[in-house]
Amino acid sequence: MTVTLIASVAENGIIGGDGELAWRNSEDLRRFKKLTVGHPVLMGRRTFESIGRPLPDRRNIVISRSPGWSSEGVEVADSVERALELAGDQDSFVVGGGEIYAQTIDLADRLEITHIELELPGDTHFPGIAPANWERIRVDHRDGFSFVTYRRRPVPIVDLEQLLAALEPELHHGEYLYAVVEHIPSGIDPVVVVAESEGITLVLPREQADELGIAGVFPCAWITLRVPSALEAVGLTAAVSRALTADGISANIVAGYHHDHLFVPVDRAADTMAALAALAHIRN
């Protein structure tokens, strides 16, 4: 069973006001229907009353603390926990309102958010989406809004053996360069930015460096070490460095908040991926 929160959220976090949606869009409504049909939808009583009827082709589970409240075509739960029990092992969608979103975001596995590129008036907010807890896995841009799918980040791992077993290296497309600049030019999308006393170190796509006439060194491939490593974890970069050193592969490792990033000579990228696969296999 997965629990997914689905909502349309303005730039200021507003989702509604006076019991009504803050924003309506036909494409957004079609997406909502496509995602939720055939699944239980969980909502608060006020959200149900604003809709005015059960959503067709879905189990409607309404959360209400009012004793004796009922409505034809819906199941009633007196708490979020009871609503999830009623949903059982079916993948479920939470569809509002603000209080129910706030009570369920820490229980959710995914978020399906329509990000509206406007600030809207209203009195109902969607809870904050903390980047430390949520990873964007799909973004679909539209005119004035975007459909974004988030996945909950796994619990960070500290144990080295578990880290290596979970390691999933990702080789990115293209070639990258190291460069030093006095300021970051507009129109570039650097992978790495490090402010040093000698200047600002960038790692950026080679095409962008060539277009802007930025001199670079160490043509390299970029590999993300995808594994939910805790910041206090010890040994992952050392294990990777030892494995690459044994194969004669030079490498630079840059630590990110969520993942470490590996930069190796372009002509050794395939060898690096093989060495990382062997490293994970050894620990399994």
Image (cartoon, helix red, strand yellow):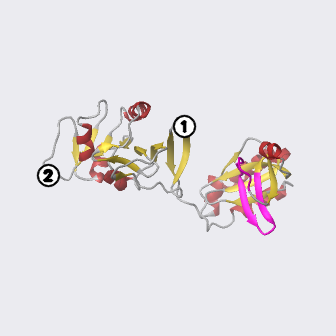
Quarter location, residue 1: top left
Name the residue rendered at 30%, 53% in the picture.
81
Q: Any magenta on residue 53?
A: no
Give the residue displayed 72% in from the left and 62% down from the top: 237
In this picture, residue 272 sits left or right of residue 51 = right
**Is residue 101 visible to us here?**
yes
Q: Give how far apart the Cα atoms at labels 2 and 1 are.
A: 43 Å
Q: Nearer the viewer, residue 271 or 20?
A: 20
Q: Which residue lies at the image location 44% right of the left edge and 31% below the top edge?
A: 27
Disc number for residue 67:
2
Q: Nearer the viewer, residue 136 or 20?
A: 20
Q: Amino acid at mark 1?
A: Asp
Question: Of the numbered discs in the image, which one, if any, rests on residue 40?
Answer: none
Write the start and end of the magenta stretch as one range: 184-203
Q: How many numbered discs?
A: 2
Amino acid beneath label 2: Pro
Front of the two marks 2 and 1: 1
Q: Position of residue 144 (x, y in %)?
A: 50, 38
- Is 209 located above or below residue 159 in the figure? above
- Figure quadrant of residue 41: top left
| Label 2 packing within 10 angstroms: few (<14), some (14-19), many (20+) | few
Q: Residue at x 34, y 55 (%)?
A: 103
Left-right relation of 153 to 125? right
Q: Is residue 36 above or below residue 235?
A: above
x then y, percent, for residue 10? 44, 47
Do callouts 2 and 1 mark residues in contact (Cβ within 8 Å)? no
Disc 1: which residue:
140
Q: Secondary structure at mark 1?
A: strand
Q: Is residue 260 above or below residue 120?
A: below
